Image: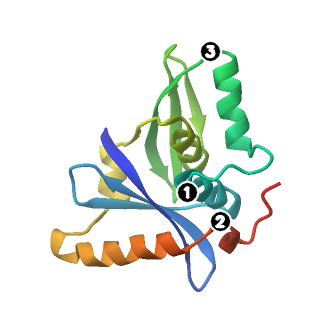
Amino acid sequence: MNELDVVGVRVEMPNNQPIVLLREVGGDRYLPIWIGPGEATAIAFAQQGLAPARPLTHDLFKDVLEAVGQELTEVRITDLRDGVFFAELVFASGVEVSARPSDAIALALRTGTPIYGSDGVLDDAGIAIPDEQEDEVEKFREFLDQISPEDFGTNSQ
């Protein structure tokens, strides 16, 4: 397993499909995962430190975990089958729960939980971006700084 950081979310044109971009910590691979607009909003909210007037589903799940005394210790992006990514939530109790990566990432950002990607997933879907192309990634980060959750066209009530 390789630790991943969330670079951010953006909308891929022309099909208007949101993606979340993860970066391998200590490596040069990036992992793009296509996600839904609701999850894109949830991830963007968490990255920007925004708290909606009413809790989103991921905020509610975090609150429930705290209320029942469960700690999420890691999120793992474990597999890629037929173009579909799979993830697991790993709890301190040893329990592992299957999840969509987008939901797992949104929850990890809210709880400060590390995210890991399997070697197989990074080998199959990771994109190596050498240091000399880092300026392109910086442009992407600048784009992320300009975008707001409202740009995803979802209603966050």
> What residue is drawn where x is 62% and y is 15%?
69
Could you tell whether 5 is left or right of 42 in the image?
Answer: left
- Decide if residue 26 is on the left or right side of residue 122: left
Q: In the image, is residue 144 above or below residue 41?
A: below
Q: Circle 1 sits in a helix, a strand or a loop, which is it?
A: helix
**Secondary structure found at label 2:** helix
Residue 84: quadrant of the picture: bottom right
Q: Is residue 57 above or below residue 136?
A: above
Q: Which amino acid is tagged 2? A: Pro
Left or right of residue 2: residue 31 = right
Q: Measured from the top left, where is residue 83 in percent x and y?
A: 51, 60
Residue 123 falls in image quadrant: bottom left
**Where does label 1 land, which residue?**
48
Q: What x and y, as percent, mark residue 141? A: 40, 70
x, y percentage for residue 42? 64, 53
Let me know if residue 126 appears in the view: no
Residue at image location 56% in from the left, 73% down from the top: 147
Q: Which quarter of the rendering shows the N terminus?
A: top left
- At 52% from the left and 75% from the top, the residue drawn is 146
Considering depth in this image, is 36 or 43 the residue closer to the camera? 43
Q: Categorize mark 3 by other alpha carbons within 10 Å: few (<14), some (14-19), many (20+).
A: few
Task: Check whether the beta carbons of the residues at disc 2 and disc 1 lie within 8 A of each other.
Answer: yes
Q: Which residue is mark 2?
A: 149
Classify 64 as above or below 59. Answer: above
* CA distance separating discs 2 and 1: 9 Å
**Residue most toward the right?**
157
Q: Residues within 10 Å of mark 2 (few under 14, many from 20)?
A: many
- Mark 2 vs 3, N-terminal side: 3
- In the picture, measured across the screen, residue 17 lies left or right of residue 131, that is right
- Three-letter amino acid code at the position of disc 1: Gln
Q: Determine which residue is flagged by label 3.
A: 69
